[in-house]
Amino acid sequence: MKTEDIEPFFAALKAANPQPNTELEYTSVFELLTAVLLSAQATDVGVNKATRRLFLVANTPQAMLDLGLEGLEGYIKTIGLYRSKARHLMQTCHILVERHGGQVPRTREALEALPGVGRKTANVVLNVAFGEATMAVDTHIFRVGNRTGLAPGRNPLEVEKRLLERVPQQYMVDAHHWLILLGRYVCQARKPRCWECVVAPYCGYQPKTPAP
Ligand code: SF4
């Protein structure tokens, strides 16, 4: 993608969706952290279904500890890898209570020190909860970054660095959501829906998929 196409690319995404947000449901930073931790290799819809019930009984680290490992597993067993996610979440809650006064820390270092929280999860929490200009590169953003030519890279970290260099500052905080939604609903893995894509004039992918 040519440099001069980057600004109109994001302007088009913004015009179509001025206030993008995560599709995970949450009402606190701890709920967001929990939902993101549970969402690895699972759909947001599936996670929301489980957390809607879970958060009614446990939406703080202490309440989660009180629920206990088996209790937690009962709420999340419809989610893939639920056993290891439950274990990680309980360990994380221990650390939040013991070292952070029951709060979610807002530094990358402290977040990445939590069990089950990698760079991507830390980036989502920093971006969505704390409004920082971080770029969590998931499978959708990785594909869109490469396919459009916006941020080519061989691995998620390369794509993340390239995005941080190339995304104009005024779009940085929301870019993560726009790119995920673009990848999830339009620039899909098997067949990008170029014929109905608002960024088609600026995207470097050729040839574009014709309308069916
Ligand atoms: S034009 Fe096609 S390839 Fe480019 S972002 Fe849109 S859907 Fe993806």
Image (cartoon, helix red, strand yellow):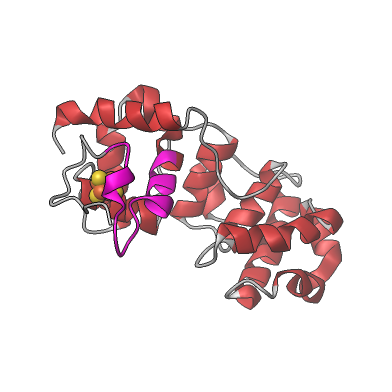
Q: Is residue 39 visible?
A: yes
User: Is residue 185 rendered magenta in the image?
Assistant: yes
Quarter of the image with the N terminus is top left
Side of 150 where 52 appears, left or right: right
| For residue 172, above or below residue 122 | above
Quarter of the image with the C terminus is bottom left
Q: Nearer the viewer, residue 88 or 194?
A: 194
- Report x, y in % for residue 97: 76, 52
- Report x, y in % for residue 129: 59, 37
Q: Residue at x 26, y 26 (%)?
A: 8
Span colored in magenta: 178-199
- Report x, y in % for residue 190: 30, 65
- Report x, y in % for residue 119: 44, 53
Q: Residue furthest front?
A: 212
Q: Residue at x 79, y 55 (%)?
A: 55
Asked where in the image residue 156 lies, by quadrant, the reply is bottom left
Q: Is residue 94 visible?
A: no
| For residue 123, above or below residue 42 | above
Q: Residue at x 54, y 66 (%)?
A: 42
Side of 182 where 42 appears, left or right: right
